[in-house]
Image (cartoon, rainbow, N blue to C red):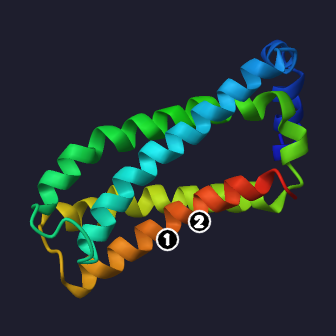
Amino acid sequence: MTALETFKTLQSSDFGRFLGGLDHLLCAVMELGHIAGMILLLSSVLLTSLNLLGLGLRNVPLAQIERSTARLFWTGLALLVVSGLLIFIPAATSYYPNDFFWAKFVLLGLALLVYLTLYRKVAAAESRGTWLAKTTGGLVLSLWIGVAFAGRFIGFF
């Protein structure tokens, strides 16, 4: 089954038709949930990345920042996944030809891969200020901001 066929199947499913028939106010609430999820996730990434770059919270141990913001990251990611699916399913075929939609998911995959591997390893090692820490902080921050911008541009193109 191709991606387009999968998108058509999702959109034409009973659940897809149910979501598509919801009041626009409920759709706006789903979009607000998506935005709130991105704010939570980005706030966690921003605080730890700025620390890795040596630009913020210098007197606070990196491991403490990471522990304190981990709940923000995971709550934000959960909100993004749930609200994103609820937004996507009723209009799946309209997303298929959108290059920003595909760019968002490439960036999302890369951001999760780097966050769950290199980023967490660097944060656990308390290695801020090193070349690796600064590169990792900049890379993760850039990837997640890229996800946010690509997602925002979906609606315009």
- Report x, y in % for residue 81: 56, 36
| Placement of 61 over or under 81, stated as above or below | below
- Report x, y in % for residue 141: 44, 67
Report the residue marked by disc 2: 146
Nearer to me, 157 or 81: 157
Q: Residue at x 27, y 46 (%)?
A: 69
- Report x, y in % for residue 6: 82, 36
Label 2 environment density (alpha carbons within 10 Å; few <14, some 14–19, many ≥20): some
| Placement of 116 over or under 143, stated as above or below | above
From the viewer's perspective, is 151 left or right of 70? Answer: right
Nearer to me, 120 or 129: 129
Which quadrant would residue 109 be assigned to in this image? bottom right
Q: Residue at x 42, y 67 (%)?
A: 140
Mark 2: which secondary structure? helix
Mark 1: which secondary structure? helix
From the viewer's perspective, is 58 left or right of 155? Answer: left
Q: Residue at x 76, y 58 (%)?
A: 153
**Amino acid under label 2?**
Gly
Q: Which mark is residue 142?
A: 1
Q: Residue at x 75, y 54 (%)?
A: 101
| Placement of 80 over or under 15, stated as above or below | below
> Which quarter of the image is occupied by the N terminus?
top right
From the viewer's perspective, is 50 left or right of 38? Answer: left
| Cβ atoms at labels 1 and 2 below 8 Å apart | yes
- Report x, y in % for residue 77: 47, 40
Mark 1 to mark 2 CA distance (whole Å): 6 Å
Which quadrant would residue 3 be assigned to in this image? top right
**Amino acid under label 1?**
Ser
Label 1 environment density (alpha carbons within 10 Å; few <14, some 14–19, many ≥20): some
